[in-house]
Image (spheres, rainbow, N blue to C red):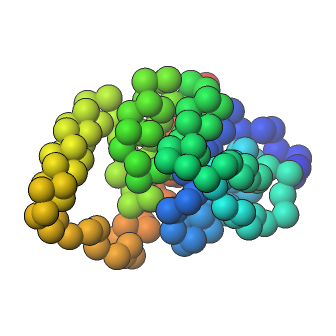
Amino acid sequence: MNGLPLHPAHLWVDADACPSVVRDILFRAAKRVNARLTLVANQPIATPPSALIDSIQVAAGFDVADDEIVRLIQPNDLVITADIPLAAEAIDKGASALSPRGEAYTLENVRARLQMRDFMETLRGSGIHTGGPAALGAADKKRFADHLDRFLANAASP
């Protein structure tokens, strides 16, 4: 460790689909504020050498990584995920959730996002092409870094 007290929040990453640029932001932030960071995926994920940063490889399968994150998170932790059902479960356990695009999931918006996700799945299931998300842009990266910094500052405050 770097002599700083350990940050009270633990950062959890749904790493299977997390862009590498977002992981790099998380690596730097964890080291800067002395926060634990764990990446969970069903494939090996490279992490920089650090006592603060690790990864957990879970078995392949639908929602296996999500289930492991839900099992391990604690209130006041932060989950980084684009998976809305995982974000909803994290919030239900008292954690915070943030998308790799810097969109904060809240108790107020996560249910509406779940409904929209289900609606879009229904459309796709009936053969309607709904398109995919746009590529991660500079504004998304900045929004992510800004939200992450705010979360870390608030979590460190007494």
Question: Is residue 48 found left or right of 101 in the rendered image?
Answer: right
Question: Is residue 126 found left or right of 21 in the rendered image?
Answer: left
Q: Depth check: 50 or 55 in front?
A: 55
Q: Depth check: 125 or 58 in front?
A: 125
For the image, the number of numbered tags is 0
Q: Position of residue 61 (x, y in %)?
A: 55, 49
Displayed quadrant of residue 7 = top right
In the rendered image, the vertical position of residue 132 relative to residue 57, given as above or below: below
Q: Depth check: 75 or 68 in front?
A: 68
Q: Position of residue 153 (x, y in %)?
A: 56, 42
Question: Is residue 39 found left or right of 88 in the rendered image?
Answer: right
For the question of whether residue 77 can be seen, the reply is: no
Displayed quadrant of residue 68 = top right
- Name which residue lies at 25% across and 33% down: 111
Q: Position of residue 139 (x, y in %)?
A: 35, 70
Q: Quadrant of the C terminus?
A: top right
Displayed quadrant of residue 9 = top right
Question: Is residue 1 found left or right of 26 in the rendered image?
Answer: right
- Name which residue lies at 22% across and 51% down: 121
For the question of whether residue 22 can be seen, the reply is: yes
Q: Depth check: 63 or 156 in front?
A: 63
In the rendered image, the vertical position of residue 35 relative to residue 49, given as above or below: above
- Name which residue lies at 28% across and 73% down: 134
